[in-house]
Amino acid sequence: MVSAPFLVSAPGKVILFGEHAVVYGKPAIAAAVSLRTFLLTTRNAAEFSDVVTLEFPDVDLQYSWKIQSLPWNAVPKRSIDTVRPPSELNTALMEALERGLVAHLSPLQRSAAVAFLYLYLCLCSADMPGMTLSVRSTLPIGAGLGSSASVSVCLAAALCLLSGEVSPPEKKGEGDGDFNAANYASIELIDAWAFLGERCIHGNPSGIDNAVASHGGAVMYQRMSKGNPNVREAMRNFPPLKLILIDSRQPRRTAVQVANVATLLQNYPLVTEPILNGIGALTSQAYKLLLMPKGKCDDAWEEQLRELVRVNHGLLVALGVSHPKLEAIRMAADELEIGETKLTGAGGGGCAITLVRRDVEESRIFELKQRLDGHGFEVYETSLGGFGVGCLFPTNSNAAEWEEWEEKLFSLHHMLGLGDREDIQKTVGVGSIDGWEFW
Ligand SMILES: Nc1ncnc2c1ncn2[C@@H]1O[C@H](COP(=O)(O)OP(=O)(O)O)[C@@H](O)[C@H]1O
Ligand SMILES: C[C@@](O)(CCOP(=O)(O)O)CC(=O)O
Ligand SMILES: [Mg+2]
């Protein structure tokens, strides 16, 4: 059990191949991005010791609940011989939460508040001291980069730390290499709780986003049915890919896009199933290509990967999850012969990725960026495959620094615009402050 204050952080992700089909048990490939969510947990002052406060400035939500008034009676009893939470939400608890606690909030705010309350009630207890949990993300929200999963992972990590379900990361010993069994078990637990947070936000998530946000790196992921463990293959030697990440800035909710595909599947199973199978098959092909030793990643290899990107996008269009703005991005990249483009994440708006040909001159990439900018789209610079969930506790040596970036991240949020994302990230980012530890 740890005491506040402390920070946790988790990354967003880019799905390279296989979104939507992954919900139906097909493989998908995704990698962590350098844009991240940060969650600060602080102890409330004495006069607020009986409330738990949520500050979600990115979605304009600040709310306090009296801890004693929360529906503790509806919390399902945990089985003593299983450490991991069940993968289904408890209906009685969901009903108790949605009945009155969050009814007045917008859908954007409500799903995040429900995810918090669900995890808080399951992991904490009515006698916990009053806390404030403040979340701030450098990820665009509802844009396909897994902001919901990075928030869910941060909530799960903070609440697991507070309740003692997980301990802070152990320092890796000599001979451990990258692996430490206790840390691995902690990530698995955080991932499993975050999946329930994702369920509150999405309805039917595959689990790939929370897997990447908690473990980091790049993975091939496949959801298994009938209680079989999901496949999560870490892809360690992921080749450096030249990708451009473009946000159409068309808002959409993953829950709606996933539900639309479910309806299509229900109405036209004979048409939709082959599309999902096709996406699964092309992802398996891409997986083999991405595992090739560096020496074999020649022009033909690159050409095949790009083809798979194009086919993947075409099949997503067939599922009905593209958007005219995503098509405008794809057309601009096609016209300039820069590479192949696909939407990433749930689509219906949000982001696209272009896999750039290695031989393209920088001037053409510059022109693409200018055109996209002219349409009001935002181009992100991000690197793939970074750290997963981590935490930071203030120490004497970083106390002054702590105040500086705490202020920057959480107090000035209303003044910060989109352009300041990188600035925030530089100030508080993993890698720029000593002391971040990863499980
Ligand atoms: N910074 C944030 N603060 C609070 N809630 C957030 C934040 N980022 C994401 N969320 C939650 O996640 C939802 C968006 O998730 P989703 O529709 O899956 O899009 P994506 O995961 O692609 O960004 C929001 O409606 C909100 O509930
Ligand atoms: C569409 C889907 O495959 C990815 C959704 O990602 P995002 O929420 O749009 O970042 C759904 C899922 O895998 O849970
Ligand atoms: Mg999401």
Image (cartoon, rainbow, N blue to C red):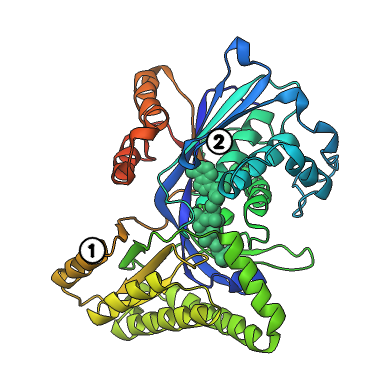
Which residue in the structure is indicated by mark 2?
170
Q: Residues within 10 Å of mark 2 (few under 14, many from 20)?
A: few
Quadrant containing the C terminus in the rendered view: top right
Residue at x 59%, y 46% (from the top left corner): 106
Q: Quadrant of the N terminus?
A: top right
Q: Residue furthest left?
A: 363
Question: Residue at image x 29%, y 80%?
Answer: 334
Q: Is residue 80 left or right of 300 when viewed as pictured?
A: right
Number of other residues with Cα within 10 Å of mark 1, as a class: few under 14, some 14 to 19, many 20 or more: few
Return the mark for residue 353.
none
Question: Mark 2: which amino acid?
Answer: Glu
Depth check, front residue: 77 or 188: 77
Most extreme residue toward the top, as rendered?
Answer: 46
Q: Name the secondary structure under disc 2.
A: loop
Where residue 71 sits, quadrant-wise, is: top right
Q: Could you say which disc has been placed on residue 374 in the image?
A: 1
Instruction: Pinpoint residue 166: horizontal percent, then vertical percent.
Output: 65, 36
Percent across and percent down for residue 263 are 67, 74
**C-alpha gap between disc 1 and disc 2:** 48 Å
